[in-house]
Image (cartoon, rainbow, N blue to C red):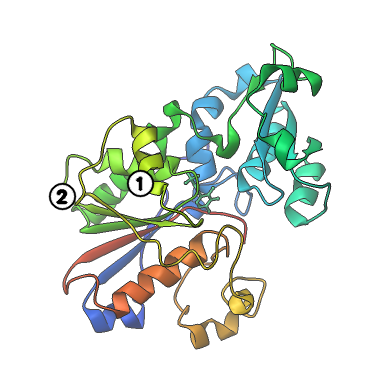
Amino acid sequence: MSGLSTSPLQSLPHPLAIAAGVALYCKRDDLYAFDPASPLQGNKVRKLRPYLAAPEALRGRTIVSFGGAYSNHLAALSAAGRRFGFFTRFLVRGEPVSNPTLDYIRANGSDLRFVSRSDYRRKNDPEFLQALSVGPQDLVIPEGGGTAASLIHAGAPFSESVVQLGRVPDYFCLSAGTGCTAAGIVAAAEQCPAKIEVFPALRGDWMRGAIEAWMGRPIPANKLEVVKEFTFGGYGKFPGHWKLYTPPGCLAKRADVGMQDLPPLDPVYTAKLFVGVLERIRLGAYPRKSTVVVLHTGGIY
Ligand SMILES: *Cc1c(COP(=O)(O)O)cnc(C)c1O
């Protein structure tokens, strides 16, 4: 696919990692993008690759998808529509609102249909979609952008990291929403000794089951750890002072909260992940001399 090859792997010599004797790296998938600083980046591009591999085939068509009012997936897909010349119609969960994500999506020319939470649950019901003028000629992409065909692409950051490091990392850590990206990573790491740590951005005990459902097979207990202590109250919830972590907030103050030397983070996914990994380093969760790769899945920051 033109304009995309691999994302960089960056060493993160954070003071906590140095003190713990841990070799810490960041796989910068936020830089895996068609255009720098576009929301069409990170794991949303990886997941959409089955569709974007031949974008000429999409020209002039309508692509329908679903998400919440802060959906990185809808932002990415709206940018893809604009770039590759297809129309986008999105069912957005909840009351009509405005925020920077939706403003961006609107500016890309997407047709937004706000639907109540109860109607949103009917999003896979053909009759309901028909009522929203979704026709058989339209392409419907699931919430989050992940499909079974996405897994091989979603797992590529793991395989790329092995090549870039020249060895298999001991730990590979990433954030999760639907678990599609995590399933791709676990599948990519299945044949080697790396342990995968998944930090859900949502509360609940369902993440391991969701990842296994994506993969279609059970995962050995010691291959995957779901770290549930860093959801910070649930999806889209985070401490108010986190604006210090994320630009355009006060970057200079990142040192006060131990976020110096880190790439820009978004508060919904990657800030929770990095706070979690740094805290686990501090607590001694990773043995001395171990190699820990943290996947920066991207996001709007
Ligand atoms: C969407 C998103 C995720 C969640 O990915 P899933 O495949 O749904 O688990 C993680 N990080 C970022 C930055 C995202 O935008």
| Residue 215 visible in the picture | yes
Counting residues from the start of the chain, the first of labels 2 and 1 encountered is 2
Picture coordinates of residue 50, whole percent (x, y):
49, 26
Residue 233's disc is none
Please name the residue shown 57% across and 63% down the image. 266
Mark 2, residue position: 193
Name the quarter where the C terminus is drawn: bottom right
Please name the residue shown 52% across and 68% down the image. 232
| Residue 109 visible in the picture | no
Q: How many marks?
A: 2
97 left or right, relative to 59: right
Callout 2, which amino acid? Answer: Pro
Picture coordinates of residue 154, whole percent (x, y):
41, 39
Secondary element type, mark 2: loop
299 left or right, relative to 78: left
Please name the residue shown 28% across and 79% down the image. 283
Mark 1, residue position: 208
Picture coordinates of residue 174, whole percent (x, y):
39, 55
Which residue appears farthest toward the top when viewing the image?
Answer: 136
Q: Label 1 neighbourhood size at 10 Å, few (<14), some (14-19), many (20+)?
A: many
Picture coordinates of residue 21, whole percent (x, y):
21, 78
Secondary element type, mark 1: helix
CA–CA distance in space, label 2 to label 1: 19 Å
Mark 2 or mark 1, whichever is nearer to me: 1
284 left or right, relative to 58: left
Say whether marks 2 and 1 touch (CB < 8 Å).
no
Please name the residue shown 83% across and 51% down the image. 97
Determine whether 42 is above or below 247 in the image. above
Callout 1, which amino acid? Answer: Arg
